[in-house]
Image (cartoon, rainbow, N blue to C red):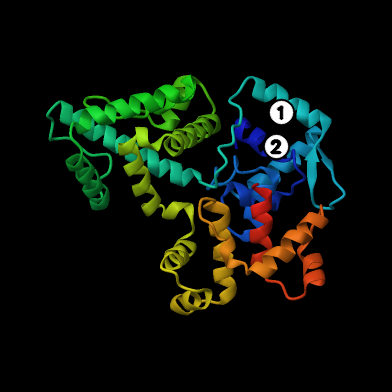
Amino acid sequence: MDNYLMHILLSMYQKPANTGQIYNVTIGRSTPTILYLTEVNGWKVYYGTLPGLKRNQVEACQKIFLKQGWLKPTPHEDKFIVSKQGQTQLDQYFADHSSLRDQGTFLTFPFYHYFWQMVQFMTQVVSEKSYANKHYLPLKSDLKSQIFVKSVKSSVQDFEASWMKEQGLLLSQVQDQAARILANTLTGHDLFGLTLDQLARFLSWEKGEIYWVFHQACAYYLSLLDQEGQSFPLHRKLLNYTNQVQTYGLTQSAYQTFRLMVKRKSLDQIAQIKGVKLGTIKEHYLEIAFKLPQVELTYLVPNQIRRELLDFFAQNPTPRYAQAKDQLGELEFYHYRLIELELIRQ
């Protein structure tokens, strides 16, 4: 593992953590426990950024951090936190390297990578069409992507000019260095975009830093579409398409549950249709709640239970589910977590 990514992992110990938690967050595990931990620890900036990471790599890094004196024990037996020496190391290192910027979403590197592949493909199509070149090797050859791009082209007048205008405006709002990295990956007529590995060599950067800056640049690019979507209709179409292909960042099973929820199917009906346990669907509810904050799910909590939980959280600054269950009697865990998440995000 390169030095940059090691410092990324070290920065996660600014909250008490163990290797299992760090591993599961960085590969983008979607269990309710990991999603909750990511939310409350402010770890969305790390979530799903290293899908190929191995657990033994995290364990090896922790041993190095301990040997360097960068971590110290916590009251929790298996957790460590950054020491004063470790914090100094982080401050000095990131003063000379790309720093972290949280975009506040649970989207992962594979999602951003797919979105940017579609941006690259669309840009290639626009460039080749402006040169009236019909004989080129498309960056994406799958039929679904080809049909999507063709439908967008036919639905907009002055497609090429509109796309170039949107892209120019978006890149102009991305931080200079990140914008240059994104721009240098684009392919057009007689121009082949660089891969991230090639860019790392060109800039004399570690691969980890290039991949991290690319990830954060894509995240910011998408945040602009969320904030100013009406100004970028073609990119919004592309993002909507990416959401469909990438199931809005949900696991496939949770996405199927989400589609059934949209059709107003009940918990019991969804479990029966999918042939799974009720507990599995309840976990899907929580995954949807964490990853898609724009979807209102507190309607799933009966009004009386909602009022009781709101009173409970108001009276308990350090709440626990077991404590709530003792006080309120029978209590569904997903009801508890949905109300807690609502309060955390207020």
Q: In the rendered structure, find residue 51 and report the number of the disc placed on it.
A: none
Task: Give 292 or 2, whichever is nearer the viewer.
Answer: 292
Give the amino acid at mark 1.
Leu
Residue 134: quarter of image: top left
Q: Residue at x 44, y 52 (%)?
A: 248
Residue named by callout 1: 90
Q: Is residue 201 above or below residue 147?
A: above
Which corner quadrant holds the N terminus? Answer: top right
Task: Give 195 or 278, whichever is nearer the viewer.
Answer: 278
Of labels 1 and 2, earlier in sequence is 2
Residue 238 rendering spot, x and y as whole percentages = 33, 42
Residue named by callout 2: 10
Q: Are marks 1 and 2 in contact (CB under 8 Å)?
A: yes
- Label 2 element class: helix
Residue 231 rendering spot, x and y as whole percentages = 36, 32
Left/right of residue 20 with respect to residue 209 in the rendered view: right
- Tell me the CA gap for discs 1 and 2: 8 Å
Q: Is residue 185 visible?
A: yes
Task: Give 340 or 77, whichever is nearer the viewer.
Answer: 340
Q: Residue at x 52, y 24 (%)?
A: 205
Give the amino acid at mark 2.
Leu
Q: Is residue 164 above or below residue 57?
A: above
Residue 285 rendering spot, x and y as whole percentages = 55, 64
